[in-house]
Amino acid sequence: MCFALPQFSVVVAPQYEKELDEKRRGERVRSLVGELSPQQKRAIELAYFQGLSHTEIAAELKEPLGTVKSWIRNGLIRLREALQAAT
């Protein structure tokens, strides 16, 4: 009598793939943030990682509000362009 062994295929769970993609994307964003000017990097970190408003960032950095807004806007543009180029 012969018995056939069951066939197994490796299936990567969609949730695992999603988590891996998110991890890679996060690593890429962190790397790109590191490439920004020190002012852009600091302003974006304060806004998006510490949750400060633009006014609070201006006070913290002792810079005009318009300057802080420019740093954040130009930094985000650079990040978006770099991410789009990578895809």
Image: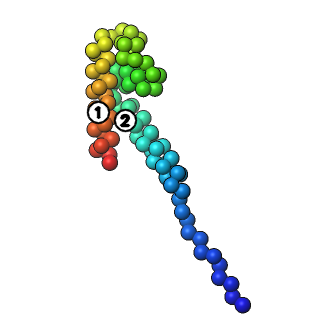
Asked which secondary structure carries label 1, the reply is helix
Above/below status of 11 relative to 58: below
Q: What x and y, as percent, mark residue 55?
A: 37, 13
Residue 33 lies, with reference to residue 71, above or below; the image says below
| Residue 69 percent coordinates (x, y) | 30, 19
Which residue in the protein does label 2 denote? 32
Residue 75 quadrant: top left
N-term-proximal mark, 2 vs 1: 2
Quarter of the image holding residue 66?
top left
Residue 6 in percent (x, y) is at: 63, 76
Q: Determine which residue is flagged by label 1.
A: 78
Q: Is residue 38 visible?
A: no
Identified by mark 2, the residue type is Leu
Residue at image x 44%, y 39%? 26
Q: Find the distance from the CA under tag 2 to the CA under tag 1.
A: 9 Å
Q: Residues within 10 Å of mark 1 (few under 14, many from 20)?
A: some
Relative to 23, does residue 63 appear above or below in the rendering? above
